[in-house]
Image (spheres, rainbow, N blue to C red):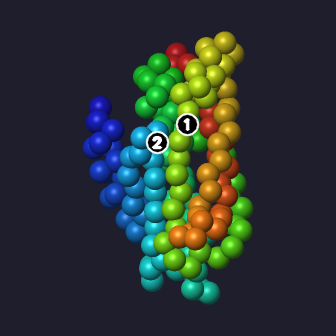
Amino acid sequence: MLSAKWRLRLLRFYPPYLGAGIRARRTQGGFEAWMPLTWYNRNYVGTHFGGSLYALCDPFFMLILIEKLGPGYVVWDKSATIHFRRPGRSTVRACFEIPEERVAEIRAAADRDGKCEPRFEAEVVDPAGEVVARVEKLLHVRRQP
């Protein structure tokens, strides 16, 4: 199994991230990801392509839970919704964290009920702090058989 550091390095070469110019780094409690506006992630009207905005947010809550819950649990993305608030015209970024108390609640629910489906939300913001998009993720967590 690869270390978290190597998984993050390999994420740079994940085709949707490489193609959109998305970069990520670990933070104290999770991840931060950002994406500059370039010719290859720009849509017809010159703003961030919606698919790239979603890709910016796609894997991080799942990666955080996989790491924090450990090998006794299976974590999958179940669904996602993105709400576009305003055009992205420059570098955008999003932060992803799951507090330890929330991880403990998820672990307890999965242990008690066999599975749980936690919901998370992330905001994609521009340099002024204006919300460009809001992404909601629903994950599926269960005990490993």
| Marks 1,2: beta carbons within 8 A | yes
Please say whether residue 94 is visible from this viewpoint: yes
Please tell me in which quadrant of the rendered image residue 15 appears: bottom left
Q: Closer to the camera, 77 or 126?
A: 126
Q: Residue furthest bottom?
A: 45
Residue at horizontal 67%, vertical 26%? 116
Image mark for residue 32: none
Tell me if 30 is positioned left or right of 141 in this view. left
- Label 1: how many residues lie within 10 Å, few (<14), some (14-19) or many (20+)? some
Please tell me in which quadrant of the rendered image residue 28 appears: top left
Residue 45 percent coordinates (x, y) = 62, 87
Please tell me in which quadrant of the rendered image residue 19 appears: bottom left
Residue receiving disc 1: 98
140, above or below 106, in the image: below
Q: Closer to the camera, 75 or 24?
A: 24
Tell me if 113 is positioned left or right of 2 in this view. right
Q: Closer to the camera, 18 or 132?
A: 132
SS category of the residue bearing label 2 = strand
145, above or below 87, in the image: above
Image mark for residue 30: 2
Tell me if 29 is positioned left or right of 143 in this view. left
Q: Closer to the camera, 138 or 25?
A: 25
Residue 103 percent coordinates (x, y) = 56, 27
